[in-house]
Structure formats: C-alpha cells, structure tokens
C-alpha cells in the first residue's frame, strides 16, 4: 500500500483575470507569499488583462518587487468580459503538463496556508470531480473568486460561455454543462479568498460561490432556463468565419515580397477557400506589414501584392494588417489578438465564432488571445515547439478546411482538447 505522502502532488496553473484594479497587487503578493509544498503546486501564473487594447500594457512585474517565485505571463483579451478572459487564460496553458487550472479574481487576498490547502483539496477528489470551489462566508466570497477546474473538463465542454455579459452566470452555466457531461463540482476545505473590496453581482453570484449541492442545482436550473431563452445554440457555437495568415498558409513565403508576379498560391489553396465560401463561411486574410514599417517595402508595393493575392484566391470578406515592426509592442501583431478582433468586428461575427489558420505559433497565440479557434498548418519553417503546442493541427490547408467545416456544422470544438487523431489529420494537441 502506498503512503498518501508518496502520492504525486497535484500541479496547477493559476489564472488571474484583471481589469487593472489596484487590488491586483495584493492578490499577486498574497500568492507569492504562500508557503509552497515540497513539490511545486503552482507551475505558472497567467495574468489576463481584460482592459481594452487601447489601454497601455500592464506592468505586472512592478507589482512584485521581490520577483515572482513562478513563471509569470501576461496576456490581453481586449475587454471582452470575464468569461472570455478566463478562456484566454486556461487555453494558453499546456494541459498535459498542468492538469488543474485555478481561477482567481483580481480583488481577492489569499490567507496564509491557502496553497497547501488547495493542494490538499485537489489531491482529495476523484476523477469524476471536474472542479473544486473554496468555501467561505457568503458576505466575502465574491463571484466564484477562487475555483479550480481540471483542464480536460474545461476542454471537454468548451470552457466558459462568453455570451454571458455579466459575471456569475457563466460560472453556473459551466457547472450545468459539466454536470451534463457526467462530472461534478466539489466544495473544498480551503477558505474562500476574502474580497479586497465589496463584492458585487448580487445574490446569484454569492450563491454560486458558496453553493452546496442543493443550492447549486437550483442555480443551474435557473441558468439553464436563461441559456435556452437567450442562447439556443450550444456552446461553443458554430464557426462562421475563417481568418487565414497570408504568407506560408495561402501563398508561398517570400522574404520582403514586393513583386505581384512573385505571388505563388500554395497547392490546393483556391479549392480549399472555395469550399468554405460554398458552405457560407466568411473568409478573411491576416497579414503583417513590418516590411512597410521598416521601409524595406513601399506601401504601394504591399498593396499591389495584396491585390494579386485577391485576384488569385479572392474575393475575401475582410483584410486586416498589422502595420508595426516586431519590436513595437503593439496588441495587433500576433500573438496579440488585435487583428483577429478587428477582422471579427468588420465581419459582424463574434470572435468565438471565428477560426484562425496559420503556420506559426504566433498565429495560434493570436487565436487563443482573441477567443477564436486555431488550426496550425505547419511548414518547414514551423518549430517543433509550435507544433507541440498547437490547439489543432492539419497537414495542409485542405485538411484544415475539413476540420473547420465540421466546426461550421457544430460538430467540432477545436478548443484545445487533446484526443486521438481523426482520419487524414495529425493528432490534436493542447494550446499553449
């Protein structure tokens, strides 16, 4: 018989969604001050900045003057709400390395011993448990401000439903869908994080945060009625638009491409695009113009190249460019979400109903940050790490379209769940 102390400790990523509140410093400081177990519980911390992209970049490192005891990443979600920001966070995690994801709001202060209690909570539950909430007094619990979910459970149901504009309803909806998938939620022994400011959101949010089994069932029944009334289509919804990287995905990669006559569509690109159009899926192009920003290519030359691409492979419903150099730190250059969000807005399609196809990890990062699906079509220039981290992968554009048309019919999630290969496709892998 194996002693309990010999069992491997659970490993989690912590996702903190912020809107730039001053209380974020206390949340991160409390997390950094935890007495960690012998084996590291927290593999990494992901801060998701959900302010509009026009806001200046958040200097999270300045909030931890003593440094972070774990790898720290900061992502931007463009002000699309807590559900979308949480999805950006967990989908950026490697699920095969980090089986649990703990979500914290930016207004909580963690008591001493929280990390050890979280480790005990996660170690105590069986495989049928999809998530473990903290317990705590109703008046300080906030809106599910401290809850951990299994990565595979989130991926299996598509994560949080981003169609809920208010915090709390997406928590209850997720619980409902997990229960429908045969999983359950448990109440842990760790104390709920205490709010750094008065919680808002009303009785529903507080009820969700501290609900026992009976109360949670009542809440989820209420939310189920809301879901059926407002959102008859299941989550995640069908793919309605596909945005494709230009160079390396649609046309052959040519450094500093300025000559329209040098544009060479990749084999099968035209047929693949026409299949999407015939299915009623909007099609757009994403491209960088760093060569224009540096002066290596003129704006007129770049426009002529785009016109040639459109002539050979169009018409396209939208074009979006990042006009900045790689060192500009702009949110529109992949892996930032800007061009994807702008293209979705131009099309009148929600980002979560879009998919991005590209040949680089940055393209997939842009998809994750924007809340879109992502399919990697690797080339000889694609790095092994990018292949391993892809949310989904196809051998060529035609195979990618097979996958996307299934998603357009509502038959494929494409949200980072690892599973066996499907015919004519390479294995799908977890997002990074």
Image: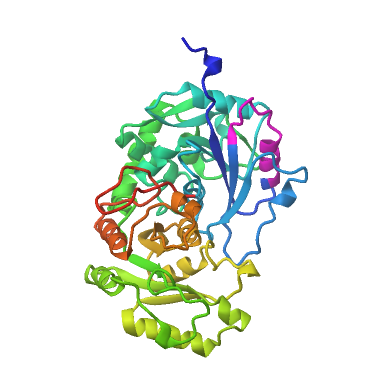
Q: Residue furthest bottom?
A: 300
Residue most toward the left? 278
Whether residue 33 appears in magenta in the rendering, the answer is yes
Q: Which is nearer the eye, 343 or 167?
A: 343
Task: Return the x and y of residue 40 as percentages of the image width and height.
Answer: 61, 31
Direction from residue 41 to residue 370 in the image, left or right = left
Where in the figure is residue 16, as x and y percent of width and height?
58, 45
Q: Can you tell which quarter of the image residue 211 is in? A: top left
The answer to whether residue 13 is seen in the rendering is yes
Q: Is residue 413 above or below residue 269?
A: above
Q: Write down the region rendered in magenta.
A: 25-42
In the image, 301 versus 282, the foreground residue is 301
In depth, the one of 173 and 114 nearer the eye is 114
Is residue 275 shown in magenta? no
Check the image and report above or below for 66 versus 324: above
Q: Nearer the viewer, residue 191 or 45?
A: 45
Q: What residue is shown at x 42% (from left), y 87% (from top)?
A: 260
Q: Residue at x 66, y 29 (%)?
A: 36
Residue 318, picture quadrant: bottom left
Residue 188: tell me if it is visible.
no
Looking at the image, which residue sits at the far right?
Answer: 65
- Is 359 on the left or on the right of 12, as rendered? left
Q: How is the image coloured?
A: rainbow
Depicted 315 relative to depicted 122: above or below: below
Please provide percent x and percent y for residue 231. 31, 53
Q: Residue furthest front?
A: 380
- Residue 220 position in % (x across, y down): 36, 37
């Amino acid at each position: 018989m194996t002693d309990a102390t010999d069992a491997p400790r659970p490993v989690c990523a912590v996702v903190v969604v912020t809107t730039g509140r001053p209380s974020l410093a206390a949340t991160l400081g409390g997390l950094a001050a935890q007495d960690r177990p012998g084996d590291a519980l927290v593999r990494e911390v992901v801060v998701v900045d959900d302010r509009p992209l026009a806001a200046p970049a958040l200097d999270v490192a300045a909030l931890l003057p003593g440094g972070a005891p774990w790898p720290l990443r900061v992502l931007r979600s463009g002000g699309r709400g807590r559900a979308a920001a949480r999805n950006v966070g967990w989908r950026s995690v490697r699920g095969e390395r980090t089986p649990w994801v703990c979500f914290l709001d930016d207004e909580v202060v963690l008591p001493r011993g929280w990390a050890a209690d979280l480790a005990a909570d996660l170690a105590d539950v069986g495989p049928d448990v999809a998530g473990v909430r903290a317990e705590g007094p109703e008046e300080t619990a906030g809106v599910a401000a401290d809850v951990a979910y299994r990565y595979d459970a989130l991926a299996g149901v598509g994560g949080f439903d981003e169609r809920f504009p208010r915090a709390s309803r997406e928590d209850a909806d997720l619980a409902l869908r997990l229960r429908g998938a045969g999983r359950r939620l448990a109440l842990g022994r760790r104390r709920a994080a205490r709010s750094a400011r008065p919680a808002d959101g009303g009785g529903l949010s507080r009820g969700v945060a501290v609900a026992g089994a009976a109360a949670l069932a009542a809440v989820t029944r209420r939310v189920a009625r809301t879901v059926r009334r407002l959102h008859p289509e299941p989550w995640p919804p069908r793919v309605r638009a596909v945005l494709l990287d230009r160079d390396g995905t649609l046309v052959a990669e040519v450094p500093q491409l300025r000559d329209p006559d040098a544009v060479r569509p990749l084999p099968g690109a035209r047929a693949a695009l026409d299949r999407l159009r015939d299915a009623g899926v909007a099609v757009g192009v994403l491209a960088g113009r760093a060569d224009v920003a540096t002066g290596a290519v003129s704006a007129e030359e770049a426009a002529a190249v785009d016109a040639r691409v459109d002539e050979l492979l169009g018409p396209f419903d939208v074009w979006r460019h990042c006009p900045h150099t790689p060192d500009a730190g702009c949110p529109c250059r992949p892996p930032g979400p800007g061009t994807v969000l702008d293209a979705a807005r131009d099309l009148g399609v929600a980002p979560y109903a879009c998919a991005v196809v590209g040949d680089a990890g940055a393209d997939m990062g842009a998809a994750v940050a924007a809340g879109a699906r992502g399919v990697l079509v690797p080339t000889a220039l694609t790095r092994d790490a990018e292949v391993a981290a892809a949310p989904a992968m196809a051998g060529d554009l035609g195979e990618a379209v097979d996958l996307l048309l299934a998603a357009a019919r509502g038959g494929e999630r494409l949200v980072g769940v690892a599973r066996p290969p499907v015919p004519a496709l390479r294995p799908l892998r977890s997002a990074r």
